[in-house]
Amino acid sequence: MARSINFILSKGSTPPAPALEDSLQRALLRAQVIVDEAAGRHVTNQAMLLQLDMLRDAVHKGSYALDSFRYQPHSAEDDDDRGQPARRSVPLFIATCAKIPRCSRGGTRILAQLREALDRLSSMVADADVLVLFLTSYPRQYRQPYGAHLMLEHCMFGRHMETEHVISFLLHAQQPSHGAEEPEVLPIVGPGRVGKTTLVTHVCKDERVRDHFSEIVLLNDLDFTDAELAALGQRCSNSNSRDGKFLVVVEVAGDFNEDAWSRLYSASKRWAQRGSKIIVTSRSDKITKVGTAQVVL
């Protein structure tokens, strides 16, 4: 009988307010750590994004409940101070009796909100164990606030979408339609001084790209001699001997020379290993017909 009574009392009793406040604050910190970590990852799973949105919403509601609990006594005292001159003529015992039920109902309501926010947040943090495990498999977002932007008539435009498109092309596996000796080509077309070179530079500086390719070669134009082409082939062949892929970036400043491009691409078939890629930038839209991937404009 004593154990039964103690069990009923433990179920029906509410933890003291300071304990609820401390528990909710710690739960908010744990949830905020998960949300901040996910914000720095490139998460593409829609179910994970939905779960993160629900967790973020629970953090906001829990913070609101915690602030409402913390600032309630100050609001009550301010109300008493503001209303004190108007209640001077009311007897003390009548004013006290009229005030106690109102404060009790308000305090009980806020404590109930505090408990509800704590239960919901604790449950969601416990369910986020698998979410945290999968977060580590997603790459971090490399933030470059102003380096990947371009200026046009005093207006700044971000190139993050184009950057991710180029990186995705470089990192994805080679299509089965292309042979082992045919590197894929990505054309980047645009007028002068719009940021084509800047875009490619930031892509090549990305750690994911540098770790993926053993050699990154930059050609300023298609105007090269046979000796330079042979030296380039020897350089890429050395990369192939280390079982690595190479990336060739060709910046065409003038008109697109189709004969020179045919020589370069034919030679690259002899050096290329599966996974090697070529990026061609030019003002001329003629390079679109030599591309094997969607052009970047």
Image (cartoon, grey):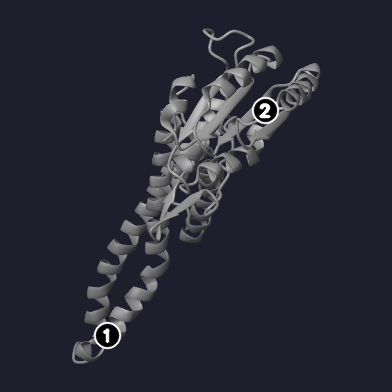
Q: Amino acid at mark 2?
A: His
Disc on the earlier residue, 1 or 2: 1
* Crowd rating for badge 2 (residues with CA inside 10 Å; few <14, some 14–19, many 20+): some
For mark 1, give the secondary structure.
helix
Picture layout, residue 273 above or below residue 207: above
Picture layout, residue 225 above or below residue 164: above
Q: Nearer the viewer, residue 121 or 281?
A: 281
Picture layout, residue 88 above or below residue 160: below
| Residue 49 spot, x, y in % from top left | 43, 35
| Residue 220 spot, x, y in % from top left | 63, 37
| Residue 52 spot, x, y in % from top left | 44, 39
Task: Judge whether residue 31 can be spotted in this image.
Answer: yes
For mark 2, give the secondary structure.
helix
Q: Amino acid at mark 1?
A: Arg
Disc 2 marks which residue? 212
Question: Which residue is depicted at the point 67% across and 27% down?
Answer: 212
Question: Which residue is depicted at the point 78% across and 21% down?
Answer: 234
Question: Which residue is depicted at the point 34% across and 74% down?
Answer: 75
Disc 1 marks which residue? 82
Picture layout, residue 88 above or below residue 62: below
